[in-house]
Amino acid sequence: MSLDLSTSVQYIKGVGPARAQSLAAKNIQTVEDLLYYLPFRYEDRMNPRTLAELRPGEMASLIAEVRGSGFFRTRKMPLMQVTFGQGRSSLKAIWFNASYLKDRFKAGMLVALYGKVEDSQFGRGGLVMKQPQFEVLGMPEQGELDAESEAKIEHSLEIGRIVPIYESADHQKLTSRWFRGALWRTLQQLQGPLADGIPKAVRERMDLVDRLEAFQKAHFPLAGESFADLQAKRTPAHRRLIFEELFYLEVGLELKRARLKGRRGIAFTAGEPVRAAIKKFLPFHPTSAQKRVLKEIAEDMQHPTPMRRLLQGDVGSGKTLVALEAVVIAIENGHQAALMAPTEILATQHYLSARRLLEPLGYRIVLLTGSVEPAQKRGIRRHIAQGGAQLVIGTHALIEEKVEFAKIGLVIVDEQHRFGVMQRFRLMKKTGEAEPHVLVMTATPIPRTLALTLYGDLDVSVLDELPPGRTPITTRRVTDDRSADVWEFLRKQVKAGHQAYVVYPVIEAAEENDLLGLTAEEVEANKGRSKLGLKAAISMYDELRRKLLPDLRVGLLHGRLPSEEKDTVMQRFLRKEIDVLVSTTVIEVGVDVANANLMVIEHAERFGLSQLSYCVLMTGGKVSPEADRRLSEMVRTQNGFEIAELDLELRGPGEFFGTRQAGMPEFRVASLLRDRKILELAKREAAIVVSGSDPAISKQEVTTVMDHLKSHWQRRYGLVEVG
Ligand code: ADP
Ligand code: MG
């Protein structure tokens, strides 16, 4: 039977209903889905290495014969050890926790191995591979392969070629080897040529190879292919598939932008009365960054399309001031404005400073949070619905409780670090015909690559200058054998009237294993030590309170406290009833307490970003090269974006956000880190297609792109619905 892209995988030879179900769990339903299941690496089995030439420290692929094997039970776990030989040379392979391998190897078997070559620390030395990947190739007789194995290997997918390696699925039931076979058969049975939805002019500009050829070569590279390019996913085949994926993503984002442009917003004027009002309330000269950003915002707000703008700037960069200027524009134009904050404390802070600052303008400002008494709440809501309240400040309560506005013109979301991408936009849906302008503020420096995708449909403004009087942060890096000095410095700061944060990577010691993602092997290796070495917030809170800083008032805030308790602790810190706040993540703190000027981060090697006047990064003795690079960078630069870019590069986008964020697209072939350049090109080409600016692209071709988006992109990415 011949296949096409939309055929269900169960019709592929060797798949069937049961395996189709295993595949479905990996989101592989159609032939096309399977084709996108690309190898995560390749093995050069064209020229496997000989044992004699291997050196410790290198990754190697080799084919060798089983000489002997043993299965041991150590106190902690079962252990499989196999000796492989080639002539006079030999190598040991060790698998931990490997009961499943007990009867797997027989003397004389031929096996392909891939792993890191190390010096053995045991016995008479020699070379060892721990946990290598392996594939049993066959059973030769007297050193020769039997006829069957020989035949198998001849046109085999396993040897004498560059071999694709796949992630296994369904708990090892579908192995890498199985995928190889299934993909080989699929490509054999597939009817070419495949329809190509990318317009011809784009394909030519980007020099893209044929689609079917791209699949064939990405799965089964030809002999001449550069092995380095393959591993780096830089072959023409990879480039084509990556571009395609990013192209459709960017077309989708472009369409969203275009759709937004077609919607009706409110064109405000920003003439003399507005300027006079702003002048009247401004407590100081805006920085040039604030002026620039306000200009961008004011321009948006004078357009009859709704503003969708993201304002990025470190804590203390003066975002609130800019936000209030935007509020003045809306209110002077006879509309209401809403400002949402992620917590009650932040909402209350905004409320207090808005009241203070906007007092000269006589605006009616209300605060609506979850803790307002029901009777009072009803009154406030009525006030909002009748248009009496001009500026409404609140928490999620504003969205959750379906507050109705008489005439909303501007919504500001102070995201700090916490809002989900979805939540941001729900508020905007409440309005009648014309849509309000929306400004999202965030203190998280979002690297450009992520901004292009996650926030690809927003315009971006950046406050990259600190207001005068805000001293740049002094960041110092120390190892924890100097902690006594650090506590002394902290004590001095507190005595001088300041407050401090002390941040730990875990709440309790028991989380350590999980957090570190230790393998059984590593747990074993750490045995004998009392601890894995991470200090935890709860125990250090006790230690600080009782022994290290008994003369100071120490408080504790962590993610598992109920939210009222968190709020109480923060309120006490704000009222200066707490000198030192012990916390778990920098993000948890999230509030800018003007009086707090020092943050000590213990195990700083485990943290990403920081913003504060002093920041002490305390680390344990041993730090990974990656963490070392990141820490040096944090000491060197004040630029949050530089750190964020580096962080993204080192840790990947998933971890960058802590948890996977709603709306974060999951790619099949592309990687935001690796493929930045292609992403930029895809964005450029997408803009050309959507704008219709290239006469070489026909209407029919554009329709094809749109159809593809409708059927694929929606289903795969279902990106955040923006308003
Ligand atoms: P963000 O919201 O970005 O964290 P804020 O708007 O709260 O920052 O500003 C931080 C502090 O700097 C506030 O105390 C604010 O009054 C002050 N500030 C903001 N802009 C200026 C300016 N142009 N000149 C002097 N101080 C400023
Ligand atoms: Mg702020």
Image (cartoon, grey):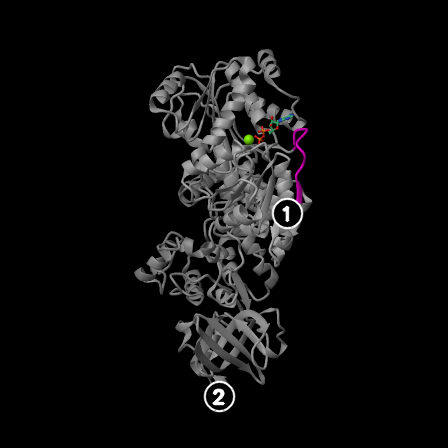
Which quarter of the frame holds ligand 2? Answer: top right
On the rendered structure, is 642 left or right of 105? right
Query: Local crowd at mark 1 within 10 Å, few (<14), some, or many (≥20)?
Result: some
Q: Position of residue 378 (x, y in %)?
A: 35, 20
Q: Tag 1 or tag 2, which sits nearer the N-term? A: 2
Q: Is residue 363 above or below residue 300?
A: above
- Which dot, 2 or 1, sits closer to the camera? 1
**Magenta part of the chain:** 465-475
Q: Residue 506 at x, y = what percent?
A: 49, 50
| Mark 2 and mark 1 residues within 8 Å of each other at the beta carbon | no
Please give the label number shown on residue 486: 1
Q: Secondary structure at mark 1?
A: helix
Residue 631: % across, % down: 63, 50
- The reply to whether the residue tagged 2 has its Cβ within 8 angstroms of ligand 1 is no
Relative to 379, does residue 208 appear above or below in the rendering?
Answer: below
Pointer 2 residue? 142
